[in-house]
C-alpha cells in the first residue's frame, strides 16, 4: 500500500535531533519491511526545504545545499512514487476550499490532499490529522 508523505513526517525523518525522528525512522523501516511504498509530491519537497533551512523553526537549520540534497534523495528513492497535481487536483482543491473552508494556514495541506486523492493515495503519514480530517476519505498514519 502507498502512504503519502506530509512535510512534518519528512522533516522528522530527516532531522536527527527532531523529537519524533526515532519514531519516524522506525515507521519508515516498518512500512518498507512490510512491502509498502511512499507517495511524494513536489510541493512537499518545496515546503521541506523551506522549513529545514529556517532558523526560526530549526535550532540547527540545514544549509540550502544540504536541504536540496536530502530532498532529491527522497525524490529519487526507489520506494517513492512521484505524484503530481493536475487539472482535476486543482478543481478538487478549489471545491474543498469552498466546501470545508479550511483557512489560509491549511491551503498547502488541502492542495496536497487533492494531489494524493487524484493519485489514488488514501493513506497519509502525518502527526497533523486535523489538517486532513475534514476532507474525509483519508486514513491518517501517525508516528507520535
Image (spheres, grey):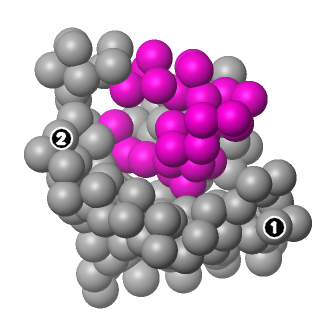
Residue 124, given in percent of the width and then of the height, sits at: 46, 40
Q: Is residue 17 magenta?
A: yes
Nearer to me, 53 or 75: 53
Horizontal side, residue 64 vs residue 88: left or right: right
Whole-angstrom CA distance, mark 1 to mark 2, is 30 Å
Instruction: Give the residues drawn in magenta, as a range.
Output: 3-28
Q: Residue furthest right?
A: 56
Residue 142, given in percent of the width and then of the height, sits at: 58, 26
Q: Is residue 103 magenta?
A: no
Q: Residues within 10 Å of mark 1 (few under 14, many from 20)?
A: few
SS at mark 2 in the image: loop
Nearer to me, 120 or 125: 125
Residue shown at the point (34%, 37%) measured from the top left: 3
Q: Quadrant of residue 104?
A: bottom right
Residue shown at the point (57%, 20%) measured from the top left: 23
Nearer to me, 94 or 67: 67
Residue 75, given in percent of the width and then of the height, sits at: 27, 60
Q: Which mark is residue 24?
A: none
Q: Main secondary structure of the magenta part?
A: helix
Q: Quadrant of residue 64?
A: bottom right
Is label 1 or label 2 in front? 1
| Quarter of the image that includes the C terminus | top right
Question: Which residue bears the numbered disc 1?
Answer: 55
Q: Residues within 10 Å of mark 2 (few under 14, many from 20)?
A: some
Q: Is residue 26 visible?
A: yes
Question: Which residue bears the numbered disc 2?
Answer: 79
Q: Quadrant of residue 105?
A: bottom right
Nearer to me, 89 or 95: 89
Residue shown at the point (75%, 54%) measured from the top left: 60
Task: Tell which circle, 1 or 2, labels the residue nearer the N-terminal end.
Answer: 1
Amino acid at each position: 500500500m502507498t502512504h503519502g508523505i506530509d512535510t512534518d513526517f519528512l522533516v522528522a525523518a530527516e532531522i536527527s535531533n527532531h523529537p519524533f525522528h526515532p519514531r519516524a525512522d522506525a515507521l519508515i523501516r516498518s512500512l518498507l519491511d512490510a512491502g509498502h511504498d511512499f507517495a511524494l509530491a513536489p510541493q512537499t519537497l518545496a515546503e521541506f526545504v523551506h522549513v529545514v533551512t529556517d532558523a526560526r523553526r530549526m535550532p540547527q537549520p540545514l544549509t540550502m545545499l544540504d536541504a536540496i540534497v536530502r530532498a532529491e534523495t527522497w525524490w529519487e528513492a526507489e520506494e517513492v512514487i512521484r505524484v503530481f497535481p493536475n487539472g482535476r487536483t486543482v478543481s478538487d482543491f478549489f471545491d474543498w476550499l469552498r466546501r470545508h473552508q479550511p483557512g489560509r494556514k491549511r491551503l498547502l495541506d488541502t492542495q496536497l490532499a487533492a494531489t494524493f486523492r487524484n493519485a489514488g493515495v488514501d493513506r497519509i503519514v502525518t502527526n497533523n490529522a486535523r489538517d486532513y480530517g475534514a476532507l474525509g476519505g483519508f486514513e491518517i498514519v501517525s508516528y507520535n
